[in-house]
Amino acid sequence: MRYALIALTILSACSPVVIQYPSVCVDDDKECQRNLNAQTLSYIGQHKAATQLLCMDLELNDLLGDDCAL
């Protein structure tokens, strides 16, 4: 039983399966990171800060309109 557990551990560690987490941005995607930061701010109750972060993008600023006014 002991050897089976060791073999299973070794096989699991060498698995070619790549695990991707949906909450991680790839290739230094600045828009993705901005959106995740805004989402995190919103989750912790900082809704105005999240909105202001999104308003830094000119296209989103136009879309959000009055919400971007200080």
Image (cartoon, rainbow, N blue to C red):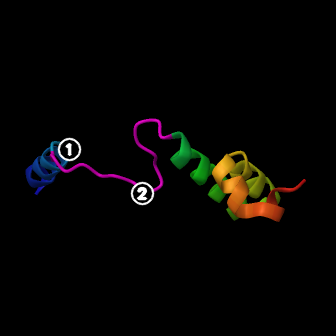
Total marks shown come to 2
At a point 15% along the width and 47% down the height, the residue shown is: 6
Q: Position of residue 7 (x, y in %)?
A: 10, 48
| Front in this rendered view, residue 33 or 16 | 33
From the viewer's perspective, tell me whether residue 18 is left or right of residue 16.
right
Classed neighbour count for the residue bearing mark 1: other residues with Cα under 10 Å, few (<14), some (14–19), many (≥20)? few
At a point 19% along the width and 50% down the height, the residue shown is: 17
Tell me the element at label 2.
loop
Mark whose residue sits in front, 2 or 1 = 2
From the viewer's perspective, tell me whether residue 61 is left or right of residue 9.
right
Instruction: Name which of mark 2 and mark 1 comes first in the sequence.
Output: 1
User: Which quarter shows the N terminus?
Assistant: bottom left
Q: Position of residue 40 (x, y in %)?
A: 65, 56
User: Is 21 within the magenta?
Assistant: yes
Classify residue 21 by image quadrant: bottom left
Q: Amino acid at mark 2?
A: Pro
User: Is 55 within the magenta?
Assistant: no
Magenta segment range?
15-29
| Front in this rendered view, residue 6 or 64 | 64
At a point 29% along the width and 52% down the height, the residue shown is: 19
* Separation of residues labelled 2 and 1 (CA atoms): 22 Å
Residue labelled with disc 1: 13
Q: Residue furthest right?
A: 70
Examine the residues drawn in magenta and state their main secondary structure.
Answer: loop
Label for residue 22? 2
Q: Position of residue 55 (x, y in %)?
A: 73, 51
| Front in this rendered view, residue 16 or 47 | 47
Classed neighbour count for the residue bearing mark 2: other residues with Cα under 10 Å, few (<14), some (14–19), many (≥20)? few
From the viewer's perspective, tell me whether residue 7 is left or right of residue 70.
left
